[in-house]
Amino acid sequence: MRPRIIPFLIQFAQLKRQQWLDADKIAAIQRERIKELWSVLAAIPHYRDLPKSSAFSRFNDVSDLSEFPILHKEEIQRNPASFINPKLDASGLMKMPTSGSTGTPLEFFLDNDALDHRIALKYLAETEFGLKPQDVFAELSHKKHMPHPILAATGLFRRVPLSVFDPESENLRKLLRIKPDVIGWYPSCLAVLAGLNNSEGNPLHVRQAFCGSETLSTGARRHIESSFSCRVMSQYGATEFSTIAWECPEENSMHVNSTSCIIEIVDGKGKPVQSGTGDILITSLHNRAMPLLRYSIGDRGSWGKSCPCGRGLPVLKTIEGRANDVITLPSGKRRNSVAFDIFYDIPGILAYQLVQQAEDLFVFRYCGNGDLGSEPAKEVKRRVGRGCLGEPVRVEFERVSSLRHPTSGKISTVVSNVRKGAAACGR
């Protein structure tokens, strides 16, 4: 199964145009997409077998989505076949495994239209932020993200894959030889590479860096921008949906691809959240092989105000990452992981992971050329204390050879092993 050039170009052109539509016209497109998918959903066992009294039997509009049960990853794991469209030939579908970085990998399936659409989404975000057809794009990932095969044959949008599992020094040498215009993806991996680039006198400079698949913290953004003398663009996506939102090049807002998916932000009871942070639910609008309705992706976020750039796409103000990225303090207050992603500029640290083992105990795991000196260690403790709002906590240190996840290559820089309570997030 391969992407098709004409459908891809049509979808890409549509996405380019639709981003400038007003909110009412975008909502109208969503309604049409839902209607097109409804007969598909009726044939899929999981949705077909919902109780007859459920919202499925009386669905009339996009606004009725809130009446449906929230779909969790565990439900798909228990019976993945019940989510696949039985009317499609399974041999003609593309299998897309998730990275498994959360410990629960899944396999999702795409039809031709969904494959073309997800590639168009990728090019939309990249070109809006300034990717040019003649650019050389070096991608550091655990798998190859190649351009559309027709574009590759023409030499346009050239991509050079690099493995995140290779030593950073080797990747830096390759990059200096390639001289890319753009680099990407995982911010944790780019931050490690930026640290090595700094240690060697910043020989690598690029025009732009694209980040995705992880939360991009302010600290990591500044670190990457400073090292490579470039602008950094962030995307929010998932294997199940491709690019969900991308950073506005004019205003730094995160625009949601609302003609491709529907995002809801809900509280612990599944009720819509208009202000503040909640759980992100996503409904796919472009996959007839395995459409997902109100899928809880495991991330948290909040809505922002409309962007002054003129795009009609809604805006995500924050994307806070996984639930285990939230730190619970001894007082019960909760702090987002971005308050602790602030160690890249400390000498001797190439990569790090801050693990909360108990409410008052943190383990700072790091990769470096040797043990941290007393002053860098003291600075780590000071910053952890500041992130904890001055509450009494201990910090222990552990030097390790690698922090990468064995399947995805990602580095989870902040992880909490503390059971979450119901306390409000500290400010």
Image (cartoon, rainbow, N blue to C red):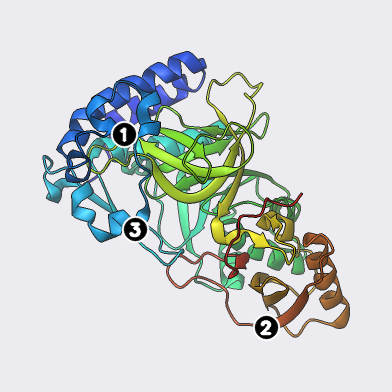
Of all residues, the one furthest to the right in this rendering is 375
Residue 335 placed where, x, y %?
70, 56
Q: Position of residue 90 (x, y in %)?
A: 14, 49
Task: Give the mark, 3 or 2, whose residue is nearer the N terminus.
Answer: 3
Q: CA gap, disc 1 to disc 3?
A: 22 Å
Q: How crowded is the residue under tag 1: few (<14 C-alpha within 10 Å), some, or many (20+)? A: many
Could you say whether the residue bearing mark 3 is in a helix, strand or loop? Answer: helix
Residue marked by disc 2: 399
Q: Is residue 354 something that shows in the picture?
A: yes
Tell me, for residue 286, which label it has, or none: 1
Task: Report x, y in % for residue 164.
Answer: 51, 66
Which amino acid is tagged 3? Glu
Taking the spot 18% from the left edge, 34% from the top edge, the residue there is 42
SS state under label 2? strand
For the point 64% across and 38% down, the residue is 276
Q: Which image quadrant is residue 65 in?
A: top left
Residue 375 falls in which quadrant of the image?
Answer: bottom right
Q: Seen from this angle, which residue lies furthest bottom?
A: 371
Of residues 344 and 83, which is closer to you in this image? 83
Of 279 and 210, which appears nearest the observer? 279
The answer to whether residue 138 is left or right of residue 341 is left
Q: Amino acid at mark 1?
A: His
Q: Tag 1's secondary structure? A: loop
* Residue 194 sits above or below residue 405 on the image: above
Q: Which residue is mark 3?
A: 74
